Every structure is written in C-alpha cells, then in structure tokens.
Amino acid sequence: MIAAGILILVLAVGPYLGGRAYARRVESMNEPVEDRLHRLDRVQRAGGFGLPIVAVIALYALGVVDRVTAPVGTAGPDLFGFAVLEFAVIMLVVFGIVALPIVSMALGTYPVVRSLRGTSASTWRVIKGVVAVMAISLVSVAIAVLGFFAITSVVGSSTPVLVAGLGVIVFATFGLSPYLIVLFQDRVPLSGEHRERVERVCTELGYRPRGLYVLEGESTRTANAIVAGTLPGFRYVFLTDYLLDECDDDELRAVVAHEFGHVAGRHLWQRGLLTVAVFGGWVFGAEYVGFGPLVERLDFLGIFLPLMGLYVLYHVGLLGGLARWQEFRADAYAAREAGREAMIGALETLADANDVRREAGLLYSLATHHPPITDRIEAVRAGRGEDDWSRATTRE
C-alpha cells in the first residue's frame, strides 16, 4: 500500500507543480492574451487526455485495483453473473485516480487563467466543474459496461452479438448523455426578462423546448449555449448568464439556432454511427487478428494500449473531422434560420467574449472538435452549406 500512497501523492502534486510552473512561464511571455490562453488550453487538453492513461497504467502496474477489491470479493448482489459491488468499487477507484491529476493540473493553471481573463470563479467552482464533466463520463461508462455484460450474458458472446450489443449500448449511452447534463450541471430555471427573451427567440425559430435553464458563466467569463435532449418533446436549452449579457437579440437567436442545427442535422446520431463503425471494426479485428501474443507478454496492457491508440485515432482524426464538419453545418443552418449577418455577429461576439480569436492549427481544431472562429466566419460569409438545408416545415 506504500506504493499506492506514493502514486496518489505523485498524481496529486506532480500535475499541479508542472501546470503551475508552465502557467507562470506563459504568464510572463510578451504575447497577446489570446495566444497565452491558447498555450494553456493546449497543455490542459493534452494533460486531460494523457494523464488518465498514465494513471490507469500505474494502477495496473501497482496492482491497486486488486488490492482494493480483495476485501470485497464477490460479496453483494450478483447481476447477470456480475459482482455489482466489486464493479462499483472498481469504478470509484478508477474514477478517483483518473480525476486526481486532472483536478491537480486545473488547480495549477487556473490562477494564471484567472489573471489573464479577469475571471472571478473560486477554486472550488473550478474543481466542481471538472468533477461534473468526469462524473458524466463515469456514469456513461458504467451504464455501457453493465449493459454490455447484460446483453452478452443473455444472448451470447459471438462476434455478431458483440457488434450488435456495441451498437445498442453506444446509441443508448449517446441518447442518455444529454440528460446527464440536467443531473450534473449546476443550473437554475430561467426566469424574468431573460426567460421572456429566450422564449421569444425559441418561438421565432419554431421550437418549444421542455425547459430553459441558465448556467453560471459570469464568474468564468464563459459564453455558451447547449441544447440537450435526443427525444422530441424532451429537449432543454441551457445558456450561460454571460452569453445572455454579451449577445443582442439577433446574435442570441443565431446562437440558439446553431444549437438547434445540431438537433435538426441529427449530429449526435451521426457520431453514434461513427463510434459503432470504428469500435465494431475493432471487435472484428480482434476476432480475426487477435491480441494473443500481446496479452501473453503484457497482460491487460496488451489490450489497453492498442485500444488507446485506436481511441486517439477515433477521437482526434475521425470524430474530430466529423465534428468540424458538423460545426460548419450548424453554422449554415443558423445563418439560414436567423440571418447571415446575425450569425457572423454572434461568432464575433463569442470570439471576443471567450478570448478565442487566435488562429488554431488543424490538429488543435480536430482535437477540440471545433474549427477556428475565423474559418467559421468566412464560411458563413460565403454562404457555404446554406442551400443544403431545406427549411423545416414542421417544428416541435
């Protein structure tokens, strides 16, 4: 257990010290604020992806999970031949170890981000935000794993069943994920003049969301909007108070229209199809190519490392490319519904409000799933993609 304690200490302190040192170096650079923020964001995103992988490898190498679950064993309820209590312990341990370095890095870099952007959010709020995002991922993974075991225990574990089960699980988790925002994000129902304003915008666009909520964004200077929900009649609109303050009515209409454009284009389901295709191909590949030699030599890592390599290709190359295209499509939808000039104005306002005017390279835009603001503005100005949308004649 000494080794496990050392691991926890390293994950808790190392990313903080490294992030703090790099952030101070960036703070002292003689560059525009947007460029320095971009540098910090790149490091945070790289750390957010790489640190969990390192943490999981360390967990395996030190046998931490086995030691923690040993007292539990197979006690507790059994579901489809699956020890539920043991699984819950494993998920909590992995979640804690993976979340620890990400929170640590965020704490190390946030003081400089706060200084550069002039934000007022407390450190505790930053921690809550990071943990909330990770909790959504944890719940999604837990549901996916349990669902997969349930399907294979009932139907079997042949390759076609595995691929079909993967499809069911992917679309179930993708469909559920927007509603997890309702559970884990701090929000309050929109009221007063703000509610009247957003209701008017939604009515003008022909949509009737089930609920309107405001997310706190003033203290973090975050201008953002989300339309969550995959089921007609059960969709929710979330907007930060900072967005409402920064945008005029035309720009707000364009921002909300962009989010509805993702719904109208069925973009979430497109991502689900891509996910099934990629990881379904992995299942078939594992069946016919096999990882026997790697597993014999590396055990768990013989599967984990190739899977992480595939995930990088999927998340950055394939899903990143699809997501960039979807952003342009949603912009074109918003330009058609709310007006081209309104959409351009909205993008300009978002760029200034979120300090994201800096030109970003292709790799960064693929990793973040968003094209640079300047590219999006140019595409809207040129009217790219507007003719591909046929204006909807029926709305919810």
Image (cartoon, grey):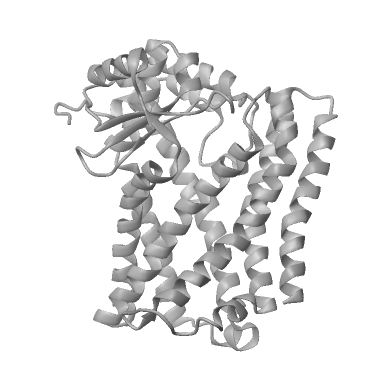
Residue 99, position in %: x, y?
Answer: 60, 55
Going by the image, does 291 lie left or right of 1?
Answer: left
Query: Where, by quadrant of the figure, is residue 236 drawn?
Result: top left
Residue at point 69%, 71% (across, down): 58
In the depicted structure, whether residue 148 falls above or below residue 235 = below
Going by the image, does 210 lie left or right of 3?
Answer: left
Query: Where, by quadrant of the figure, is residue 335 drawn?
Result: top left
In the depicted structure, whether residue 66 falls above or below residue 354 = below
Between 126 and 71, the one lying in front of the other is: 71
Residue at point 27%, 37% (across, down): 235
Q: Is residue 346 visible?
A: yes
Between 81 and 329, the one lying in front of the other is: 81
Residue 126, position in %: x, y?
Answer: 61, 39
Residue at point 34%, 15% (across, down): 192
Residue at point 44%, 85% (across, down): 74
> Among all residues in the image, which is located at the extreme left?
394
Quarter in which the C terminus is drawn: top left
Query: Where, by quadrant of the figure, is residue 25 drawn?
Result: top right
Quarter in which the N terminus is drawn: bottom right
Q: How many marks?
A: 0
In the depicted structure, whether residue 57 falls above or below residue 260 = below
Residue 96, position in %: x, y?
Answer: 59, 61
Between 372 and 111, the one lying in front of the other is: 111
Q: Is residue 160 visible?
A: no
Between 266 and 107, the one lying in front of the other is: 107
Residue 308, position in %: x, y?
Answer: 57, 65
